Image (spheres, grey):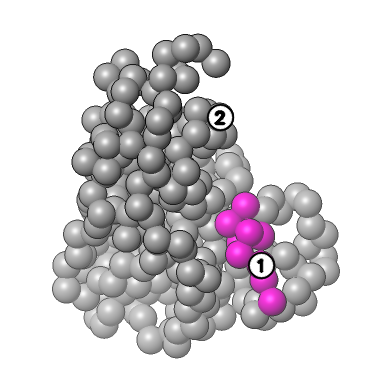
Amino acid sequence: MSGFLSSLFARREPVVVPEVPPRPRLKMEDTFSAIYAVGDVHGCEEELERMEDVILADGSDLAGDKLVIFLGDYIDRGPASAGVIDRLLTPLPAGFRRLCLTGNHDQMFLDFLAAPSKDAAWLQLGGWETLASYGIYPDTAARGLATKLQAYIPDEHIDFLRRLPVMATVGTFCFAHAGIDPRLPLEEQDDMVLMTSRPHIFDWSLYKGTHTIVHGHTPVERIDLSGKRINVDLCAYQTGRLAGVRIKDGAPSVILSR
């Protein structure tokens, strides 16, 4: 580690980030005329704006309330993490409700703020891009990083990330950032599995649940709607395509930001 980066974190004091309580798990009746679930945004504010425009146009002719679920990982990798959170904090128009779940990158950001470290893996996983979106750059933060974190990152953003639920079930669909352990019932899922697991480590033939699982986290080239697990992460920060599904009358269909 260079002397410069060492000085960046020297004599640091952590940003005051209250301990994250156990993440909420929501169970909702499906009273919505449509549900939209959107994959990993990863700092891509323009793609997020386009996706919300697609959703608002699609749902404008549908009576009743529409639920828009974001599946976590709002920050890192892309250029505009701060702008993404600002947008997610802005209410949608009447008739649309937004629900944001947590992802592993969102949790890593909180962990870093609580204990900044030059060795934090998060910095190499898109963390520098997130800090840059708040105006914190390595070449200007050689000293006083803790002060800059406190001054530049709004408390509202930290509170938003702390309060995110880790899972939501709506009718016969279950939404979580990374998916679930198919061997266990939903009420026994571990938070870390819901945020960090990969589908290939499990034998999905063992899944006997009645819910269709909708998740992101693991990039895929196309969205497969044929089974009981739907992955909607098309790696927006690399492809420019933010993806999701629309669920209407129990039937999912693919939606894309472009």
Which residue does the image show at 16% across and 73% down from the upper left?
Answer: 94
Mark 1: which amino acid?
A: Asp
Please state which amino acid type lies under the numbered disc 2: Asp
- SS type, badge 1: loop
Q: Secondary structure at mark 2?
A: loop
Quadrant holding the C terminus: top left
Instruction: Look at discs 1 and 2 and give the one toward the viewer.
Output: 2
Q: Which residue is mark 2?
A: 119
* Vertical order, 175 against 145 (above or below): below
Where is residue 222 shown, x and y percent of the image? Answer: 57, 45
* Whether residue 129 can be seen here: yes
Predominant secondary structure in magenta? helix
Q: Quadrant of the N terminus?
A: top right
In front here: 142 or 82?
A: 142
Q: Residues within 10 Å of mark 2 (few under 14, many from 20)?
A: few
Badge 1 local density, few (<14 within 10 Å), some, or many (20+)? few
- Residue on which disc 1 sits: 190
**Looking at the picture, how far across and down is residue 179, in whole percent?**
62, 60
Q: Residue furthest front?
A: 11
Residue 67 position, x and y percent, is 35, 72
Measured as percent of width and height from the top left, residue 168 is found at 50, 73
What is the span of residues highlighted in magenta in the rendered image? 188-196
| In-image side of 229 versus 96 (left or right) | right
Determine whether label 1 and label 2 are within 8 Å by CB.
no
Task: Check the image and report above or below for 187 versus 120.
Answer: below
Q: Quadrant of residue 119?
A: top right
Seen from the viewer's position, the closer of residues 9 and 26 is 9
Residue shown at 67%/53% (left/top)? 197
Asked whether the viewer can see residue 37, the reply is no
**Is residue 194 part of the magenta span, yes or no?**
yes
Q: Is residue 214 magenta?
A: no
